Amino acid sequence: MTDLALGKYNPSQMAAFLAAYGMRAITVPELMGFRDAMLNLCIPINLKVYDPIDVCGTGGDGKNTFNISTLTTFVLAGAGYPVAKHGNYGVSSISGSSNIMEYFGFRFTNKKDLIEESMEKTGICFLHAPLFHPAMKSIAPIRRELGIKTFFNMLGPLVNPCRPNIQMIGVFNLELARLYYHLFQESGGRYVILHSLDGYDEISLTHTVKIFQNQGESILDPLLFHSRVFHPEEVAGGKSMEESAGLFMKILNGEGTEAQSRVVLANTAMAITCIKPEKSLEEALQEAEISLKDKRALERFNKLLEVNLAQAV
């Protein structure tokens, strides 16, 4: 992985390597080795004083949902929880978390003082993966050209440069969820790994969701999140950046559909129980609802853009 990241192979060799891992299962030692190599090569950022959570999906589920994990970030921040969101451009979807933030004028940075200012003033920072993993520059165009999920989708949530102690990670299949579970059991920290059993890398409320966390494994029904089961079309994302951005702002303004709002609230509540294991899912849902309905999440979003714009001047 180190040699790959440092560009010691030509594009054809790199494409073949990525394709090979699309044809066979990755093992826990391989995943750990790939993760450690990327963290050793990254530009680190120490945010331990804030003890933030990262909410991140692997992507690559092919479902083209709206920006659930990014919206969850702001609802969490609105509820008073610090978040260090690790994000990137979409590879197999129209709108990844970096796409949507950039669309709204957010300027990415890897400067420690600016990131800390963002955490101090807003309770959120956005860590754009390419700025912290410069060694991955040679891989990026090949991933884009392939246009399919690769093992880098598996690695994304594992290589947040601030190495958060608390993480909620959505994965695109059950096999990977179990791999992550073994890895996190060895690595420590507080975690929730989740996979909706109809293929989503988040709590989609279109099916039951399999959960792996410090306390063990469980399967949760949408009813536990005060929700009915939704149809996949009800949680679909936009067909363009403009449409995706419109959906994003509608939901933040409390004008999303029942499905859109309940999905964001469900993911936020699950993240809150990861941060505060002593809280019940019921209590966590109430906190999430207050953050969204009272426009606290919207205020955090606007404040983050305001602070970011001032930094750019």
Image (tube, rainbow, N blue to C red):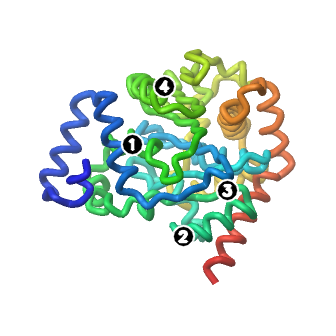
Q: Nearer the viewer, residue 93 or 24?
A: 24
Relative to 151, residue 299 above or below: below
Q: Amino acid at mark 2?
A: Lys
> Disc 4 to disc 2, how far (Cα)?
32 Å
Classed neighbour count for the residue bearing mark 2: other residues with Cα under 10 Å, few (<14), some (14–19), many (≥20): few
Q: Which residue is mark 3?
A: 124
Give the image quarter of residue 279.
top right
Give the spatial CA distance, label 1 vs label 3: 22 Å
- Measured as percent of width and height from the top left, residue 4 is found at 22, 53
Disc on the earlier residue, 1 or 3: 3
Q: Quadrant of the C terminus?
A: bottom right
The residue that disc 1 covers is 155
In the rendered structure, which disc, 3 or 2, sits on the residue that comes first in sequence?
Answer: 2
- Quickly name the residue at label 4: 185
On the question of residue 78 being in view, the answer is yes
Inspect this view and state whether residue 251 appears.
no
What is the x, y in percent for residue 247?
64, 52
Q: Give the residue number, with chain letter if any, for mark 2.
A: 111
Residue at the location (61% across, 79% down)? 312
**Nearer mark to the viewer, of 2 and 1:** 2
| Kind of residue at disc 1 | Leu
Type of the residue with mark 3 = Ile
Q: How many marks?
A: 4
Residue positioned 71% across, 27% down in the render = 277
Pointer 1: residues within 10 angstroms few (<14), some, or many (20+)?
some
Nearest to the observer: residue 208 or residue 114: 114
**How far apart, in angstroms, are the residues tagged by discs 4 and 3?**
27 Å
Q: For the residues marked 3 and 2, what is the alpha-carbon distance in whole angstroms? A: 15 Å
Under circle 2, the secondary element is loop
